[in-house]
Image: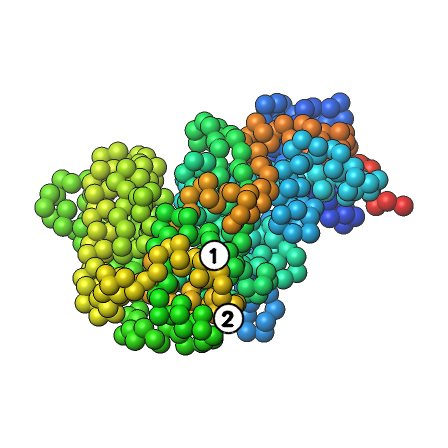
Amino acid sequence: MSDLQQILREEYERTMLDIMDPTSLLKMIEEIMEIQTPLTEEASVPAGVEFDPQEMLLKMIPDIEVSEIGWSDVRTPDEGAEIKGPQRQLLENYLRNIQGDGFEERIKSVAQFYSTGSDMIEEQAGGDRTQRIVQAISYLVFYKTLTKVITNFNASSAGFSFESFLAALVDGYQIPANTGTIADYIDRSTGTDIPVSLKLYRKGGLEVGGSYTDLVNDLVNPQYAGINGAMRYVVCTKQLSGDGLEQEGQINFYQFDFTLDNVMEILAASRLSEVIRLPQVVVSSLSAGQQAGATALLNLPAKEKALSAEELTPLFTKALAQEIEAAAEANPDNPITQIDEDALKKLIDALNWEKNDDIFNNSQDKVRGNESLGKTKVLNWVKSSYKELPELHVPLRDAIVTANAAVIASQKASAKKSERNKQIEDMITQGEFLSIEDSTRQYGLLGRAQKKQALLASLGYLRTYHFALNERQATNPGPPTNTIDLGSIMVGRRMVAQVLDSVRGLLNEEVYEIFQSLKILSDSLNAFFAGGLKNDALAVAAVDNAENIQSKEILQPDE
């Protein structure tokens, strides 16, 4: 027994060292320790090692852990050298094999792979055996990981992970909240920094909106000049059926840019078109040739600093704590007493009131401190997050909704004291702002520098309003958005299995045997040591499969 144990240890250590050296492909394969494949005659299978043929196809694909924090881990210390965390590096190692010079081409490439994967690999990799396999597995990892992002999490969590995923696809990085830009991440796939604002909604419920003030600032004083100072929007709609992990369907990708030239035309037809109205005195001055300082003609008091969503979060947290405490004091039997200090912190982190638009009313603009929550939406979130505590659902929903209302009340009280807002209201009443149509027409006659001045004097900028486009407007292929349809990507366990099945010919028998042997080796070792080193058959199986892995031609360097 001791001799066999020593042979096992030496063979395992030697084999694993040998197979890690010849090619980076094995690094990919070594992560597939949970793979299950059909058996071959060359695989030594001990009793107790089982395979589920129905799960084989999905488990052939490496499993990437979904982690918004890990995927967004891109740090730039004082020295200036960018450092990426291990989870981000792992994801990028796969995604960099997706073909295409930019985001548009890469999404189209993935969409096309679903129907013509084998042909694409043949064309792109040619006769390079290793490259063919690396590319095939990389596309499959994209499909499988995207499916996990969309189906394994609630809408809010999926949106944040989706943002991290796309940022990694374009070698970009996410932008922290409240940094004065409406962009969510930077796209560096073309060698320049392109700011991107991302929207992911179910089909039929898409709304592209946000802070009009931030949008104007991005166009007037762009932080990133990758597309001539424009702001890019990537708009995605989900068409899914089924529940939970069994959801399947597709994600439709669209793209358009807000520019100095088209912003007024785009927003003129929107639900909140009032934002673009221009003061007559400013338009007259700019039309007469004034290039700067036109807003000074309004003689408005200085703008009070509006609290950002980040700054309002402590107010919401305090209000929610007070609501929970008051409910508990009023009724000691109230289930909400289960939310202690630690549970409240976890609740606040999970709810993510600062960014979670899904709990706000559809008909509102989702401005923290101004808009109400949807009771049904909050209840659905609570049910999803506290499935094991049904008695807590309604009381916790009520506390969250009431806390948000308290924040709104505090901000409305501050706004009523604003002399600036009173003066602007007087200007509206006295007809000193042009109509939407006249504002759009006059804006179009201005030069680039004058357009910037006009935007800074627009009603939405003066009052810190929000803008909103519906799905039809945001996906319109014609003017003024000229939205590009990038294609649709299929998601779902069944869809991923079908893609893998379509490229099985590229993943030749040797690779399948490697996957299988790795699985058997792992299971055999685990069972051997867990069983007290007593089952010789498990040890022999481990040695046999280690030798089988080492002998495979695919692991040997090309001559």
Q: Nearer the viewer, residue 445 or 333?
A: 445
Quadrant of the rendered structure where residue 370 is?
A: bottom left
Q: Which residue is mark 1?
A: 263
Q: Residue at x 58, y 52 (%)?
A: 168
* Horizontal side, residue 317 vs residue 198: left or right: left
Give the CA separation, mark 1 to mark 2. Answer: 15 Å
Characterize the local packing of mark 1: few (<14), some (14-19) or many (20 or more) Cα atoms within 10 angstroms. Answer: many
* Horizontal side, residue 59 vs residue 347: left or right: right
Q: Residue 472 at what x, y percent from top left?
A: 46, 40
Pointers 1 and 2 in contact (CB under 8 A)?
A: no
Characterize the local packing of mark 2: few (<14), some (14-19) or many (20 or more) Cα atoms within 10 angstroms. Answer: some
Q: Tell me if residue 194 comes above or below residue 253 in the rendering.
A: below
Q: Look at the image and tell me in which quarter the N terminus lies.
A: top right
Residue type beneath disc 1:
Val
Quadrant of the rendered structure where residue 516 is?
A: top right
Q: Residue at x 79, y 48 (%)?
A: 22
Q: Which residue is mark 2?
A: 449
Residue 69 appears in the picture as rendered: no
Q: Look at the image and tell me in which quarter the C terminus lies.
A: top right
Q: Tell me if residue 492 comes above or below residue 397 in the rendering.
A: above
